[in-house]
Amino acid sequence: MTTNLLKQAINCDDGDSAARIIMEALGLETDDLANFCLKHWPSERMQRARIIGHWLHAEAQFLA
């Protein structure tokens, strides 16, 4: 995933759009984990980045 896609996801005003950007980039088909991790989408970019990082970490553990 390129840095630009991460920036796009972090800059999204809603979690659904951010999830779609990341899921398409990674080729993920199910959004169950994304729905859980991105349930509450904050207004602060730093918090968004942490949430995306948490989701990607959880996704990696799930896929392993």
Image (cartoon, rainbow, N blue to C red):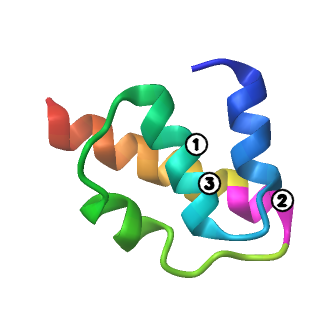
Pair 2/1: label in front: 1
Q: CA distance from mark 3 to mark 2?
A: 12 Å
Residue 51, x across and y down, in percent: 58, 59
Q: Amino acid at mark 1?
A: Ile
Q: Which residue is mark 3?
A: 18
- Point out residue 13 in the picture as x, y percentages from the top left corner: 79, 68
Q: CA distance from mark 2 to mark 1?
A: 16 Å
Q: Return the x and y of residue 45 as percentages of the image width and height.
A: 84, 59
Left-right relation of 13 to 14: right
Q: Are marks 1 and 3 in contact (CB under 8 Å)?
A: yes
Identify the residue at horizontal 18%, vertical 43% (top origin): 62
Tell me where the magenta segment starts and ends, as one range.
Answer: 44-48
53 to the left or right of 28: right
Q: Label 3 crowding class (10 Å Cα cut-off): few <14, some 14-19, many 20+?
A: many
Q: Secondary structure at mark 1?
A: helix
Q: Quadrant of the rendered structure where residue 60 is?
A: top left
- Residue 33's place in the image compared with 23, above or below, is below
* Three-letter amino acid code of the residue under disc 3: Ala
| Residue 38 counted in the magenta span | no
Density class for disc 2 (Cα within 10 Å; few <14, some 14-19, many ≥20) is some
Mark earlier in primary sequence (3, 2): 3
Q: Which amino acid type is marked by label 2?
A: Arg
The residue where tag 1 is placed is 21
Q: Is 36 located above or below residue 12 in the figure? A: below
Contact check, label 2 and label 1, Cβ < 8 Å: no
Q: Which residue is mark 2?
A: 45
